[in-house]
Image (cartoon, helix red, strand yellow):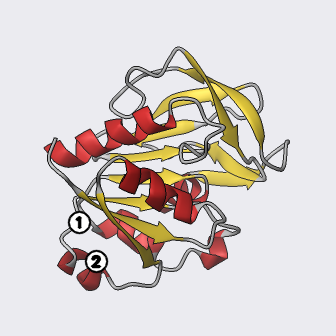
Amino acid sequence: MRKIKILVVNNYGQFCHLIYRAAWDLDMDTKIISNTMSIEDILAEEPDGLILSGGPAIDRAGLCCDYVREIDLPILGICLGHQIIALTYGGQVHAGKKGGYAEVDIEVIEEDDILRGLGPKITVWASHVDEVAIIPEGFIHLACSDICEIEAMRHSIKPIYGVQWHPEVSHTNQGEKMFMNFFEVCDQY
């Protein structure tokens, strides 16, 4: 695979720098950008894909909904990024039953592109302060857990993916594999 360029959109989450580092360690050309950067400036960077980081709240997500709607590139949303994708396409988000960060066992329902080779079950590190409650129309349900029904999803046509968990942290099993699967999508797009 060629060295691809990944822009990590900073949504003020505490793990944003770890997403950058994970992509860097996997030999990707990567850069953290503000979530208020214009679409024109993002496209001028000539990225191969975007990763929407986690963060504290949807009201601090800047222009991320515009990015998801208008940028024709592979997009991976992590935690808040996952929720941004759901809201952008008409899904719903609510407060989770379990709050802070914890180990969660995920059941892979459909492997698809980004979960290929990870299932049928993986242990991850996730926060469920907020979570996707209703999957948007036109999305495919990829993974669930005992505490959250929609742990992962993807758009049925576009290369847009969301995961509730944090593949960038060491507590998540096979996080690197999931990132490499996403980078392969970016390489082939």
Kindly identify which residue carries mark 1: 47
Q: Are marks 1 and 2 in contact (CB under 8 Å)?
A: yes
Q: Position of residue 127 (x, y in %)?
A: 73, 48
Q: How many marks?
A: 2
Q: Is residue 36 above or below residue 73?
A: below
Which of 167/29 is in front? 29
Q: How many other residues sit within 10 Å of disc 2, few (<14), some (14-19) or many (≥20)?
A: some
Examine the rendering and report whether any part of residue 139 can be seen. Answer: no
Q: Is residue 119 left or right of residue 33?
A: right
Of the image marks 1 and 2, the number of the one nearer the N terminus? 2
For badge 2, the amino acid type reads Ile
Q: Is residue 110 above or below residue 176?
A: above
Q: Position of residue 75 (x, y in %)?
A: 36, 55
Residue 42 is marked as 2
Q: Position of residue 110 (x, y in %)?
A: 44, 21
For badge 1, the amino acid type reads Pro
> Which of the image's four quarters has the N terminus?
top left
Residue at 50% in and 37% down: 175
Local secondary structure at mark 2:
helix
Q: Is residue 116 above or below residue 93?
A: above
Which of 24/108 is in front? 24
Examine the rendering and report whether any part of residue 175 can be seen. Answer: yes
Local secondary structure at mark 1:
loop
Residue at 55% in and 64% down: 16
Which of 29/110 is in front? 29
Residue at 49% in and 56% down: 19
In space, the residues marked 1 and 2 are separated at their CA atoms by 8 Å
Q: Position of residue 178 (x, y in %)?
A: 43, 36
Residue 147 is marked as none
